[in-house]
Amino acid sequence: MTIRISIDEQLAARGLSVGEFAAAVGITPANVAVLKNGRAKAVRFTTLDAICRVLECQPGDILHRDG
């Protein structure tokens, strides 16, 4: 089982760059890259909440279970 985070599609749909997104969420662009590339081992709920706030989405819109 793998959990995948689909941020690229959300950023493209909203015309946000990685830098703009990172600044709005309060994380570094390097951490955005870790999320986008599937290398993250965990995501804090506060970070997930900030991501969803910035992207105006629900967690299920960006978290997917491949299994």
Image (cartoon, rainbow, N blue to C red):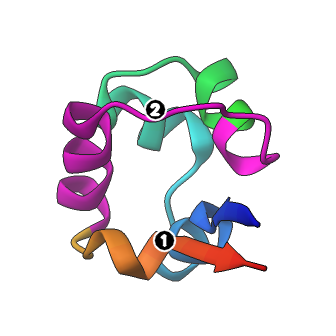
Question: What residue is shown at x 32% (from left), y 68% (from top)?
Answer: 59
Name the spot of residue 21 as percent of width and height, x first: 44, 43
Q: Amino acid at mark 2?
A: Ala
Give me the C-alpha separation between circle 2 and circle 1.
16 Å
Q: Residue at x 78, y 79 (%)?
A: 67
Q: Residues within 10 Å of mark 1 (few under 14, many from 20)?
A: some
Q: Residue at x 65, y 31 (%)?
A: 41
Is residue 50 placed above or below 22 in the rendered structure? Answer: below
Placement of 47 over or under 11, stated as above or below: above
Element at label 2: helix
Q: Nearer the viewer, residue 49 or 14?
A: 49
- Within the image, what quadrant is residue 27 found in? top left
**Quarter of the rendering occupied by the N terminus:** bottom right
Which numbered disc, 2 or 1, marks the residue closer to the eye?
A: 1
Main secondary-structure element of the magenta-colored stretch: helix
Q: Are marks 2 and 1 in contact (CB under 8 Å)?
A: no
- The magenta segment is 35-55
Name the residue that disc number 1 marks: 62
Which residue is rendered at x = 46% and y = 32% of the image? 22
* Residue 9 position (above or below residue 38): below
Image position, residue 2 (x, y; %): 75, 62
Amino acid marked by disc 1: Ile
Q: Is residue 66 left or right of residue 28?
A: right
Q: Position of residue 43 (x, y in %)?
A: 44, 35
Query: Label 1's element?
Result: helix
Mark 2 vs mark 1: which is more N-terminal?
Answer: 2
Badge 2: residue crowd in 10 Å (few <14, some 14–19, many ≥20): some
Q: Determine which residue is flagged by label 2.
A: 22
Report x, y in % for residue 39: 79, 35
Please count the marks in the image: 2
Closest to the observer, 14 or 38: 38
Could you tell whether 67 is left or right of 51 in the image?
right
